[in-house]
Amino acid sequence: MSLIPKTSRDQAESLFSKSRTQSMSLNRIMSERDAVSQAREAKTARLRELRLEKEAEAAALAAASLKRKGQG
């Protein structure tokens, strides 16, 4: 700690610098959170598509199986 008292300008610059640093940190955190959220949404959409395809295939196989049983 300095023995020389800070001037009002030094104090203001220090507070501004601290505020700017906090703002930059907050922006970085928010950007990271948004990126994680977008990645999660993309993965959920991809998994949903895969599930729907699998369900459609299962339904088609079941329908084909019932059709064969009815003919046989």
Image (tube, rainbow, N blue to C red):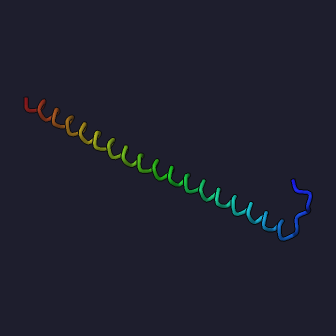
Position in image of residue 70 (x %, y %)? 11, 32
Q: Residue at x 61, y 59 (%)?
A: 27
In this rendering, the answer to whether 60 lies above or below 32 is: above
Q: Quadrant of residue 68?
A: top left
Front residue of this view, candidates 19 and 8: 8
Q: Left or right? Give the position of 49 relative to 22.
A: left
Q: Residue furthest front?
A: 3
In this rendering, the answer to whether 41 lies above or below 51 is: below
Q: Left or right? Give the position of 55 relative to 65.
A: right
Q: Quadrant of residue 25?
A: bottom right
Front residue of this view, candidates 72 and 56: 56
Position in image of residue 29 (x %, y %)? 60, 53
Point out the image quarter for the C terminus.
top left
Front residue of this view, candidates 60 and 10: 10
Q: Residue at x 28, y 39 (%)?
A: 54
Position in image of residue 13 (x %, y %)? 78, 67
Q: Residue at x 26, y 42 (%)?
A: 56
Q: Residue furthest bottom?
A: 9
Position in image of residue 66 (x %, y %)? 17, 33
